[in-house]
Image (cartoon, rainbow, N blue to C red):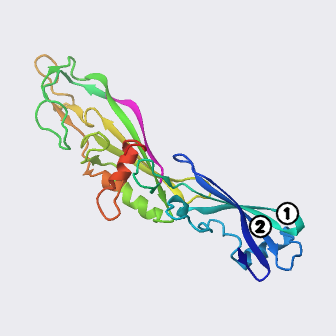
């Protein structure tokens, strides 16, 4: 109960709902307000006065107005999302207040802790390449370095043009949810976009070092009034580790040919790309390194311990 100069309020109802991954968890409270002189409240005229007296109604987007239950986790992050009110018997005012948050109970934790939604999506695709050799004896490099030796194998006839082919790829979208009230989003994005255009020096979700390229990072607000942002990393895995078969070019600007009119020399080459460790950028720890629980919950599945 809260007793003010003009009004007295007390809670008369409580309902809670824990949402699934990506859905808000909510608490809805019913608050009854009466005037201390027992005259009827005129909601359309007195709402602002009730709010200004303080202690009766939480501020919009303010934190949870009630007492957080002992041992609670996600409840402490609740924010007020809406007020609705109606007249009750004998001139009292009945107010419904809804709180919500995207923080949720971590299903993989052994103790009751909170977590923000995160997930990963995969999609197969391919990219167009030109073959100048088949049955090569030197495979595409698994490092970040272009090789200077011939790849061997059987030359494609008519080496001026090569042979069109496709190389398998996997597009990977890693989605994390961040709280703008905990850390400024410009700092978040400024720290994370640094891996764009880089190859990975660490294994990520079963994809080995140097097999991934970060194609982009995006940050988009979740919901109309929520303080949460979804930060998405667009990665691509490539079966050839992003290398190409590049023939040695003759003076005329065409592939240098051997006596059989095939490409005389072919090497594995790619555009020069910087490299970086992806995991500390995508899942930074509280001080340094990698938050391994956050990483595993995202890359292995939200229910994997």
Tell me the residue at 31%/51% (across/down): 279
Tell me the residue at 35%/39% (across/down): 236
- Magenta stretch secondary structure, dominant: strand
* Label 1 CA crowd tier, 10 Å (few <14, some 14–19, many 20+): some
Frontmost residue, 215 versus 96: 96
Q: Quadrant of the N terminus?
A: bottom right
- Quarter where residue 146 is shown: top left
Q: Specify the segment rendered in magenta.
A: 116-128
Frontmost residue, 203 versus 63: 63
Residue 127 falls inside the magenta stretch = yes
Q: Is residue 17 left or right of residue 206?
A: right
Residue 19 falls inside the magenta stretch = no
Disc 1 + disc 2, Cβ < 8 Å: yes
Tell me the residue at 37%/43% (across/down): 299
- Quarter where residue 62 is shown: bottom right
With respect to residue 97, does 209 lie above or below?
above
Can residue 173 be seen in the rendering of this structure? yes
Quick one: SS at disc 1?
loop
Quick one: SS at disc 2?
strand
Q: Earlier in the sequence, mark 1 or mark 2?
A: 2
Label 2 sits on residue: 32
Label 1 sits on residue: 88
- Quarter where residue 250 is shown: top left
Q: Position of residue 293 (x, y in %)?
A: 36, 52
Q: Position of residue 43 (x, y in %)?
A: 84, 68
């Amino acid at each position: 109960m809260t007793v003010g100069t003009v009004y007295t309020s007390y809670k008369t109802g409580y309902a809670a709902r824990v949402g699934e991954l990506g859905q808000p968890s909510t608490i809805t409270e019913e608050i009854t307000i009466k005037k201390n002189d027992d005259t009827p409240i005129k909601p359309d005229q007195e709402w602002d006065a009730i709010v200004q007296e303080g202690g009766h109604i939480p501020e919009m987007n303010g934190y949870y107005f009630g007492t957080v239950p002992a041992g609670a986790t996600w409840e402490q992050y609740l924010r007020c999302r809406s007020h609705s009110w109606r007249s009750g018997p004998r001139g009292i005012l009945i107010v419904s207040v809804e709180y919500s948050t995207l923080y949720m109970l971590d299903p993989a934790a052994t103790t009751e802790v909170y977590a923000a939604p995160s997930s990963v999506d995969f999609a197969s695709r391919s990219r167009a390449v030109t073959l100048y050799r088949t049955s090569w004896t030197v495979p595409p490099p698994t490092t970040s370095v272009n090789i200077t030796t011939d790849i061997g194998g059987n030359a494609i006839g008519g080496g001026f043009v090569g042979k069109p082919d496709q190389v398998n790829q996997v597009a990977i979208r890693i989605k994390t949810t961040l709280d703008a009230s905990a850390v400024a989003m410009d700092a978040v994005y400024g720290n994370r976009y640094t891996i764009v255009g880089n190859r990975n020096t660490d294994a990520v979700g079963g994809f080995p070092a140097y097999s991934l390229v970060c194609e982009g990072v995006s940050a988009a607000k979740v919901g109309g009034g929520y303080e949460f942002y979804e930060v998405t990393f667009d990665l691509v895995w490539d079966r050839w580790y992003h290398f190409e078969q590049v023939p040695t070019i003759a003076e005329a600007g065409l592939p240098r040919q051997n006596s059989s009119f095939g490409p005389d020399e072919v090497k594995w080459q790619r555009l020069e790309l910087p490299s970086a460790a992806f995991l500390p950028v995508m899942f930074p720890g509280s001080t340094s390194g990698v938050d391994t629980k956050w990483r595993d919950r995202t890359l292995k599945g939200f229910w994997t311990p």
